[in-house]
Amino acid sequence: MAAAWRGRVVTTVLVPLVSVVCGFLVGAIAIVAAGADPLVAYGALFAGAFTNHNALAETLVSTTPYLGLGLAVALGFRAGLFNIGAEGQFYIGSLAGTFVAYSIHGLPPVLEVPLGLIAGMAGGALWASIAGGLKARFGAHEVITTIMLNYVSFLVASYLVDTKGLMLAPDVSTPRTPDVDPSAVLPVILAGSRLHVGFILALLAVPVVWFLIERTTIGFRLRAVGFSQGAARAAGISVGRTIVLTMALSGALAGFAGIVEVLGVNYHMTDTVAAGYGFDAIAVALLARSNPWGVLPAAFLFGALHNGAGFMQLETQISSDLISIVQASVIIFVAAPVIVGWLFRLRRAPAETVHITQREVDAPVT
Amino acid sequence: MVRGSRLTGVIAAATLVAAAVLAVGCGSTPTTGSSCSKTWKVGLVTDVGKLSDKSFNFDSYKGVQDAQADSSLCVQGRAIESSVESDYPKNIGQFVDQKYDMIVTVGFKLGDATIKAAKANPNIKFVMVDYGDFTDNPTPSNLVGLLFKEDQPGFLAGALAGLLTKSNVIGAVAGLQTVPPVVHYVQGYENGAKYTNPKVKVLKIYQPESGAKDFNDPDWGKQQATTFFGQGADIIFGVGGNTGNGGLLAAKEKGKMCIGVDVDQYVSYPDVDSCLITSAEKHLDKAVKTAITTMVQGSFKSGLLTFEMANDGVGLAPYHDFDSKISADVKAKIADVQAKLKAGSITTGVTS
């Protein structure tokens, strides 16, 4: 029992932690290669992420989309679905939510904000269900379909938002949608910063998703399908329906992240609203080992890296792209725990074992 | 054994964190020449194209670096690259927080964020590269837009093409017709070619709306150029980012001549060096340096700074590999056209 517990600590806490440290070390090598001092660079990264004026608030602003998107990808992982389409669902969710949020007028914020959010989540959910449906009905692999749907969604966004697009704002010099209705804006919660209510909502999504996965029938089916589709089918679970539902939920979370970014930060939509958040989110979910609670620190790390990179570049003139090297290295180490184990001679982490509790066995399965 | 190694890992992590915390206190301090009573701090924020674009961002930042290298200006320049839309106000804010004197933003995508920041920070000068559309906003007194007369270098490039074509057919593969600078270049090119060679036929095509592939569809550009070659063209002017670059690449592969755009593409797109006779340039670096100079010398004016032949803000890039192949006679004629454009004794005939 104690050994099992220790094994869990190693896999869920120590491996990611060591991976992060190793990622920073690899990044340090790149910084030296770029001709700068890694300590100065990381010092500036730290200052830009935490200690500068408004830096912590900005880090939380950057953390917000990673929370929603990280949860989206993690939820898919738990059902054995590799949702690479979070970026596209983010775009479609943003488009749908933005359209509603600039079209409605005159309602109180208590109605307009939820309407915008629901439209965003519905957009993401519908978009992701396409991939889910194709998988459930035809066995089309979701990795392929979600990647392809990403391109479609980028093009749809460009088509609607760029020159002459249906959602293009009149009388603006930059290609974007009109601003959302003031009542649909997520209010700022820290005066003088951009930190908005969306961050709190994204935080609340963590326990909600955890509860959904771990404590509901839907979550049980979702995990059962993730463990073994054959066994799930034998137990009477409709695998197809579960796949479509999981993709829809995952897409809803991605769409939520998208519309929150619009209603909380940009107030309008352009075709560069995400630019890679959805792909970074795969890394966030991996780092979190698909655990909703793990998404919390992982998203915070990625938000801090994204936010600190600007000041690091200001101080040292190292390209902010260097942060991608740190992120990528972290993921390589996370994805290959053997490397970490070998580097630090950790005892090999025991293979994840499936514990089905009595309660879950008793859960009604249809 | 296992425990000990784990401890090592934790210690390593702790050391790194501690080092990072310590390093915060010792951020780099700007070095100033002794002759400078004040160092002017200039920050540049890129759009999502980043500094490595070898084009707008790269050349604009070169202007900042040139100003820094000019010891009479006492400028210290820094850049921050943006990766998403929400970075624009934040990265501008980084320079505002550090009390920079001037903030340069590159490209129209930063328009909203720049105007907003300019209104909120009247003591900081703001420069928007390649942005002149202030019609909907009264220009704040601390904001200047750098605007270029693209028809002039287009005209000059066309004049050269008109003189060098053997088939009397030349082509232009362009980005979207809805983007005014693209049209200015192409119309100038056509008029310039006809100025030096009345018999010339100019084939031109604008890319249809293609969403994310706007200005980014080299395959399409290559196809169109190849079609033009089939119709006898022997020179291609590529006007439109990667779409235009596709046209240049086709010229190189078919052994035809090509003309680049915006920056000296001999540098920014070395793959096509062997076909590149010149590039129709906007001197972004010069324009940015000029804007910085106006601040240092106290002659900063809000509104628009227009760059044209007359102030050397636009022009033709060197002939590079073709320098020895172009006759002195042709070079003299081009110099003559350039001088006349500069003096205003001829116009490009492009109005809109």
Image (cartoon, coloured by chain):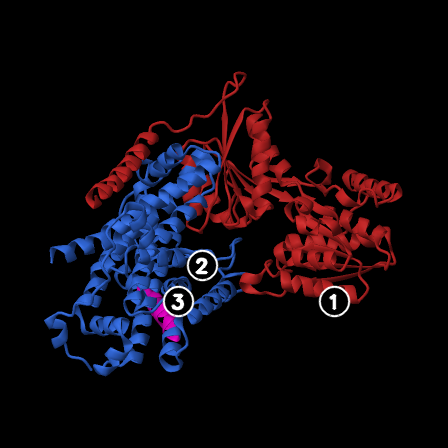
Chain colours: A blue, B red
Q: Residues within 10 Å of mark 3 (few under 14, many from 20)?
A: many
Instruction: Name the residue type under label 1.
Output: Thr
Closer to the camera: disc 2 or disc 3?
3
Residue tagged by mark 3? A96
**Callout 2: chain:** A
What residue is pinned by disc 1? B227
How far apart are labels 2 and 1 at the CA level?
A: 40 Å
Q: Is residue A38 magenta?
A: no
The local crowd at label 2, few if under 14, some if 14 to 19, many if 20 or more residues have their Cα within 10 Å, is many
In the figure, residue B52 lies in which quadrant? top right
**Dot label at residue A178:** 2
Residue A145: % across, % down: 43, 71
Q: CA distance from mark 1 to mark 3?
A: 40 Å
Q: Where is residue B310 shown, x and y percent of the image? A: 73, 37
Amino acid under label 3? Answer: Ala
Work out whether residue B152 or residue A79 is closer to the camera in this orientation and state it.
Answer: A79
Chain part drawn in magenta: A116-130
**Residue drawn at point x = 48 percent, y = 60 percent:** A169
Q: What kind of element bears circle 1?
A: helix
Q: In terms of secondary structure, what is the magenta stretch mainly?
A: helix
Residue A58 lies left or right of residue B119; in this view the side is left
Q: Chain of mark 1?
A: B
Q: Is residue A358 above or below residue B32?
A: below
Residue A309 position in % (x across, y down): 40, 42
